[in-house]
Amino acid sequence: MASSRAIINSILALRILTLLLCAASLALIVLTTLRGSIKSEFRGIKSYRYVLAAAAGGILYSLIQLPFAIYHAIKKKRLIKGKFLPMFDFYGDKVIAFLLASGVGLGFGVSFEFKDIKRGETIERGYIASGLLLAGFTTMALLAILTSMNRKGRAF
């Protein structure tokens, strides 16, 4: 069985990785939106706005969780005593994982449908942004598993 120190460090690494992947997805969508001829194409699809919002939600949640994870990794104890942080981790990770998963599905779906109408780098960037969000969802799903272990009394 893995040591509690390794699990705590894994949680910190996964939180940082989730933040970076969601930020990369958001940046790719925003940069694609700001490019000249692509501007009207990408903004015209409201589904990509949801993908953007899902990535932003993942970033915001990761930024909220990061200081707590850093403190836990360095001090080997929770910043706030009691059951609040484990419960916040447990439910928050799952809600954000579902948000990211829905963003991934919508991003891939609209990119696939839009591919038949218009060819070009807009669609490729839509796939790449959705792929980055998929990786962010995967890391968040792993976090949800690790934080579930903490809630079940196997505290680390």
Image: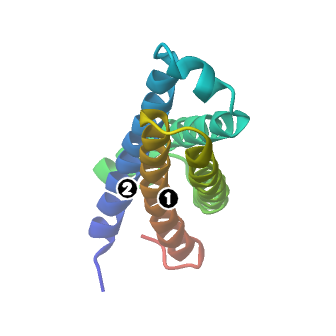
* As drawn, 55 above or below 84: above
| Type of amino acid at the residue the image marks with label 1 | Met
Residue 112: x percent and y percent? Answer: 58, 53
* Residue 114, percent from left and from top: 61, 44
Q: Secondary structure at mark 1?
A: helix
Q: CA distance from mark 2 to mark 1?
A: 7 Å
Above/below status of 149 relative to 107: below
Which residue is disc 1 drawn over?
140
Q: Secondary structure at mark 2?
A: helix
Task: Give left or right: position of 116 versus 66.
Answer: right
**What residue is shown at x 56% (from left), y 78% (from top)?**
153
**Residue that sits furthest to the right in the current view:** 46
Q: Earlier in the sequence, mark 2 or mark 1?
A: 2
Q: Are marks 2 and 1 in contact (CB under 8 Å)?
A: yes
Compared across the picture, whether 2 is left or right of 65 comes to left
Which residue is drawn at the image coordinates 50% and 44% (left, top)?
Answer: 65
Q: Nearer the viewer, residue 57 or 108?
A: 108
Viewer-closest of 132 and 156: 132
Vertical comparison of 118 with 34: above or below: below
Neighbour tally class for label 2: few under 14, some 14-19, many 20 plus, Cα within 10 Å: many
Quadrant location, the N terminus: bottom left
Dot label at residue 64: none
**Image coloring type:** rainbow
Label 1 Cα neighbours within 10 Å, binned few <14 / some 14-19 / many ≥20:
many
**Type of the residue with mark 2:** Leu
Residue at the (44%, 29%) spot, across then down = 27
Please give the residue where the numbered disc 2 appears in the rendered image: 14
